[in-house]
Image: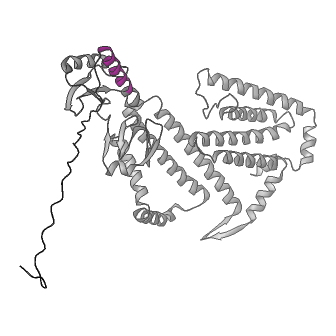
Amino acid sequence: MTSAVADTPKDLPSLLAALAQPSSLIELAVIAACLVLAWALVRLVRGPHAPQASVWFGRRVIDGVLFPVVALALVYGARVAAESWVPLAVFRVAVPVLMSLVIIRMSVRVLSAAFPESALMRAAERTISWVAWMAVVLWITGVLPVLLEELERIQWKLGGATVSLRQILEGTLSAGFVMMVALWISAAIEAQLLKGVMGERLSLRKAASNAVRAGLVFVGLLVALSSVGIDLTALSVLGGAVGVGIGFGLQKLAANYVSGFVILAERSLRIGDFVRVADFEGRVTDITTRYTVVRAANGREAIVPNEMLITTRVENLSLADRNMLLSTVVQVAYGTDVDGLRARIIERVRQVPRVLQEPGPAAHLTAFAADGLELTVFFWIADPENGQAGVRSGVNLAILSLFNELGVEIPYPQRVVHVRAPAQDVKPPAAAEPSPGRGQCLD
């Protein structure tokens, strides 16, 4: 830190005086040449087929991490070479600015790659940018070294060690840098593992990428804690407390994570499978360590905890075979030539798009209904993820068109009404003679 402080201008007037020297124009020209050379090198390395929005290159040449890194290396090399024969002024400003640009580019790109859908990333990016540029301004004006010396004097005892505020700040920055590198490496490994694969291989690589990310983040957390100054042996007590918490309060969460790794390892469910869980049916679009996303044909998505997929019944309609059997029911009038009509129905259903030729469709007489003969038409499809209503409607329309061509009658519901004759008028029976009682005389 001593050499760095000595290299920093003592105050803003001395810096402005140094920048007013004629040699500053030479420094500006050298720095501009370094930036152009860095742009050309990055453009050459990037090539015409570089991945879009990558951490190294970004969407353009200059908004990735590689450009400020190469520019910083070239400018620093030119500064070292020109130190002996040109008074340094502009280089003292350019090097901190490029260092700050490297930090900003790295943090923004890594956070965007690791958490692409997080709403907090914009706020984090702005915070990192403001802190980095403020540190550059303080460093150039000579305020930052003085501020660090004052922070070093603020000390207190933490257990048996003496900790200063400067150590905590530097340790926090080191921890953030280590976690950033861990997230960067894990995101790069995950992108390579999941590139251009489907089905079983995608599920296995998804499990591997989740394990790699968890391992790297855990190692990065340990290194970050060490850099802050926390004794890792003290984490044994914390580990015991976390174990007790998992055993009691977090058992469901732990069960979901364990179930996620079991599903990915056993391949009982794969991304792209068509499943039915409880009353929800759809295609598996993502399997994470905690939950599985199932998307129905109507666009609705269900987030199913992994523990439910392990402990309850799940119908995987495409585990061994992706083909799905569908059916539709139609009635014809009694007296119809069923044998000849079945062959014509099968021939017409074969022509419907998405209906498989092998196994082919079939038509069977399944019931003698009250209004007619009930025919059930069975057919297979190989893409259940595209929905069932469209192909079922196509089959029904094809059958209806065939019936219209052949003049086959689809019976209407028939009911028999019985009308009873009106009842005849009946005389009421004559009243009976009253029996003699007390007080009556008999002749």
Q: Quadrant of residue 24?
A: top right
Q: Residue at x 55, y 45 (%)?
A: 182
Q: Is residue 377 left or right of residue 85?
A: left
Q: Is residue 334 above or below residue 55?
A: above
How has the structure been colored for display? one colour
Residue 405 on the magenta segment: yes
Q: Is residue 310 left or right of residue 337?
A: right
Q: Name the residue furthest bottom.
A: 439
What range is drawn magenta here? 393-409
Measured as percent of width and height from the top left, residue 430 is found at 15, 63
Residue 397 seen in the figure? yes
The front one of 263 and 46 is 263
Q: Mostly what secondary structure, the magenta segment?
A: helix
Residue 272 on the magenta segment: no
Q: Is residue 268 above or below residue 81?
A: below
Q: Residue at x 56, y 44 (%)?
A: 183
Residue 198 seen in the figure? no
Measured as percent of width and height from the top left, residue 23 is found at 90, 32
